[in-house]
Amino acid sequence: MNTKDNISNTYKSVIDSLKEERDELNLKVHLASMEVRDEWQDVEKKWEKLQSKGRHLGKASGESAHELGQAFSILGNELKETYGRLKRSL
């Protein structure tokens, strides 16, 4: 084999290897994006629930206000953690 053939074979080998790695990474990036989108949809539902609980909290009294306040706090913390996780993943 001459030098030109060796260079050609090496080039093809490198390109094939990089293409395979690129394709795998491309799929992982795409899937990660889908996971982020799915998580975003879930967190949007929680956001709506938080807003609803906040509106009811103003109308509630006594024990129900306390229970709503606790649920509001828990949901608010979940949202904060999820937003942080999403921010780090982007």
Image (cartoon, helix red, strand yellow):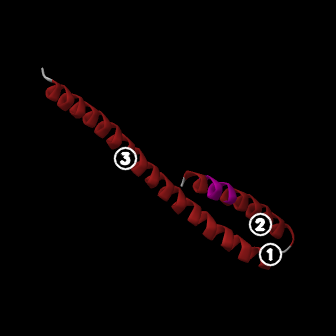
Asked whether 82 falls inside the magenta stretch, the response is yes
Q: Marks 3 and 1: in contact by CB < 8 Å?
A: no
Q: Which residue is mark 3?
A: 26
Q: Residue furthest right?
A: 62
Q: Is residue 80 left or right of residue 58?
A: left
Q: Which residue is mark 1?
A: 60
Magenta stretch in the rendered image: 80-85
Q: Residue furthest left?
A: 1
**Residue drawn at the location 87% of the way across and 71% of the way down:** 62
How many C-alpha atoms fall within 10 Å of the one at disc 2: few (<14), some, or many (≥20)? some
Placement of 10 over or under 62, stated as above or below: above
Dot 1 or dot 3: first in sequence order is 3
Placement of 36 over or under 9, stated as above or below: below
Distance of mark 3 from mark 2, alpha carbons? 44 Å
**Residue drawn at the location 79% of the way across and 78% of the way down:** 58
Q: Secondary structure at mark 2?
A: helix
Q: Which residue is mark 2?
A: 68
Dominant secondary-structure state across the stretch colored magenta: helix
Q: Is residue 43 left or right of residue 69?
A: left
